[in-house]
Image (tube, coloured by chain):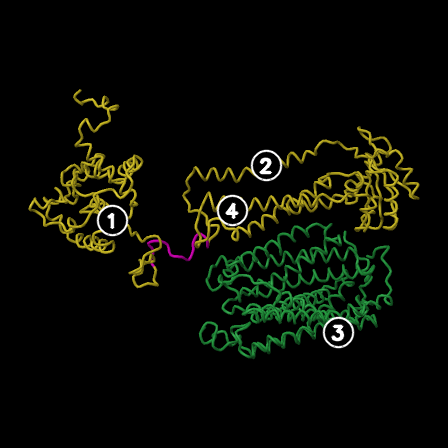
Chain colours: A green, B yellow
Amino acid sequence: MHHADAPTFDPEVASRETLNSFSDFARSITWKVGLTGLAVAFLASLLSKNGQVHLAYSYLIALAYVVSISLGALFFVAVQHVTRAGWSVTVRRLAEILAMGLIPVAPLFLPLVLLVLMGSTTPFVWANAKFLAEHPLIQAKTPYLNSIFFVIRNVIYFAFWAWLARRFLTLSRRQDVTGDPAISNQLEATAAPSLLVFALTLTFFAFDWLMSLQPEWFSTIFGVYYFAGGVMAFFATVSLVVIQFQASGRMQGLVTVEHRHDLGKFLFGFVCFWAYMAISQYLLIWYANIPEETEWFSIRQNNGWEYVSLLLIFGHFVLPFLGLMSRHVKRNVGLLRFWTVWLLVMHWVDLYWLVMPALYRETGPNFGVVDIGCMVGVIGLWLAGIQRVAGDAPLVPLRDPRMHESLAFHNI
Amino acid sequence: MSEHSTSHTSSTPEPRAAAVFGASPARVGHHSRDGHAVAPAPQPAAVFAAFHTPAELIAAARKTREAGYANFDAHSPFPVHGIDDAIGIRPTRLPFFTLVAACVGFVTALAMQWWMNGVAYPFLISGKPLISIPASWPVAFELTVLFSAFTTVIAMILLNGLPRFSNPLLSDEKFLRSTSDQFVLSIDARDPKFGGALDHLRGLGTVPETVYTDPGSKALPKIIPLAGLIIVSAMMIPPVLIAKARVSTKSVPRWHFIWDMDFQPKFKAQRENLLFTDLRAMRPQEPGTVARGELEADDAFYRGLKSDDNGAVEAAQVSRQVVAQAQPADATQPADGAAAPADGAAAPADGGPPPDPLDKLPWVTEFPVAVTGQLMKRGQERYDIYCSTCHGLAGDGDGLITQRAMELEQGTWIRPVTYHSDAIRNQPVGRLFNTITNGVRKMPPMGDVIPPEDRWAILLYMRALQRSRNATPADVPTDVLPQLKDVPQ
């Protein structure tokens, strides 16, 4: 059923709005900011004794951050196709573009992969032969945790993600030209089995890059935890992008308060889902009280890390849970923008909490210019890469068969 | 029987039955409109008009609201976007009910678990704190959801003005088309501007209809109180059965509703277990180990021995060895007959039995616990329960069991010694404690039955009994002295 006074939509006008249609200044600045950020981080790391080890960990946090958002976008697109969702068509292209960020971010992992192949204890102790010789328990895990298999796995992850992201965007853009409804069915057929592979690749990516920082520890729910935070960060990102684009005059009449309301609902939902995963992981380990499992939380409850843990409980769940509950907040541009920025910061804190305690078990949180430089640098290069691989894509699917349904979308 | 009923059914003409049941509401309606109906006279309940499209309905609702009507409603076969705004329905208050219920559920769950686990029934589970938030979390989450879900549904029903058992609109055939292919706007008779409602609807280009109140009786149908009575009576059956079961006996075994809960594949105390060569399901303690909380390092308190002489472990070992050696020897003693019943703790001066190795141990002579009136009362109570049956209420060795055993004259009973001999009176309190713990002659070890605190309490009472036989009037407080009858004044 369509609303009687649904807004009119002209594909010709909409096709002129792309990332490349931004001003030249905005287009050229992202990669400069990215390189500057990384350079600042590198220089700052030279100033302290343990600086370059910290740099590797901080760089890993930044990479895990942007990858989680792009993976959240990839998941969102796949779910929209599988469920034949109508409401989300006008925001789906933004997710398709964000998911393309997985392609330019892949080479950024090379420095860390190189460290693994060199057998450095930074960032992964299991890559080091001397460490393994002294730790028979971790030695027993080498059939999985060895540098060659590690590289093979990561090639598989990124190859699959790049293929899927490209397929979603390419076919969707083909539909922009032809308007062929059969393409929607084709995307749907791709999305369903891909979600299964996606779940496995994301889980093992989280195991490889985040959980194996403390290789003696293990948690089967860990991948879901990383996924929950990533999808939440994706919804925060896409809401923020929509708000900022509309504030600068783009996507007018295409994304309405109704769509922002729904993105806000998803954001709220994944705030809860993240907390649900976090407590599920914590509760079982707390209850079983087995030393090899509790050690991971013990580090995060002592030496100053307890404040970061409390910050997550309140900043990542309690406050946004209460703050995003009301529909008035989700329909208010200013308040929704505030919570998206807040949660994007909290997602960084979450990853910092996952990664850094492996380095600073006894000395407590350590934060500085290196971390800021890494975040600015990686986000800058990620955005520049997205611009490069998807900069000419229109910001909405132009001739999606469900476009009219999305434009007329209305919350009760 | 079945033949009869079949013929009965077929003999009833079906069209007639349909007429009786199917036509009655309409007929009542017509009667009432014609004025033939029974009292009370029908009043207009509402007027309504039908539209063909949702857009017309929204426009009509908006105009009706602008005309100053407040008590009106729209009816459509499916949800119509924008109708809420057109009618002017206020935002629902339902979320606030949900929020309050959620908070109440959350607090209830936490308070309940705090009370149950932390206060009323503190039960230590794998060393966790009695009151711990992580363990309370799942229940808190569930109760939050439960309370808010129930409250939301109930509040939604109440806010909608339900339950409402009859609505005159629903008895009108034309109105019922709003469930299939028409969009209906109704104005309630309680609206202050109802007088002009028909004209208003005509002004919208429709042919409005009037619905009248149900002319039927307002009394409850008789079936309702009857059904209520039956339900309440039926609800009484389970409590009555339970009450009966609690005060009566049965000659048949109980029912086992949940078989695998009543008969569990586990080993109970004193049962056989074929997994072990000694066939005992209750596993003895491993040699060289101490169970948690059973170290009992305090020799004075747990064994009545001075630990500072030889060191705790040594003294305890000596004590155990001695007890182990003494018991087989005792088993042969009843053959001695005469010596044993007299004074077992036998002073060496008797020249009879050999010197007891227990005499050489460093027994404590002072109570290792605080001596209080409360302890004395506790000791008296425990003594009367555990000791007096053999030893007698005053410790003369003449309890009821002893008296009966002596009457039987079977020769297997060894009469308990009196507490009031010098030998017993001079024994160190630690030695007496050992006697209670490990037993002597016919007296069984009471250490597994009576906790150490109570053994000391019993000893304290025993000391009081002994002293009462050797007291002077000076030992009695002056204010109760006059109560003693045979004290020379």
Q: Mark 1 or mark 4, which has the lower sequence index?
A: 4
Q: Which residue is mark 2?
A: B232
**Disc 1/disc 4 C-alpha distance (Å):** 41 Å
When asked about the image quadrant of residue B486, the answer is top left
Q: Nearer the viewer, mark 1 or mark 2?
A: 1
**Disc 3/disc 2 C-alpha distance (Å):** 76 Å
**Residue B158, x across and y down, in percent:** 70, 40
Kindly report the secondary structure that dominates the magenta region of the rendered protein.
loop
Q: Which residue is mark 4?
A: B113
When asked about the image quadrant of residue A27, the answer is bottom right
Q: Chain of mark 1?
A: B
Q: Which residue is mark 1?
A: B303
**Disc 1/disc 2 C-alpha distance (Å):** 64 Å
Badge 1 and badge 2 both on one subunit: yes
**Placement of the C terminus of chain B among the 4 image quadrants:** top left
Left/right placement of residue A180 relative to residue B488 reads right
Q: Which residue is mark 3?
A: A388
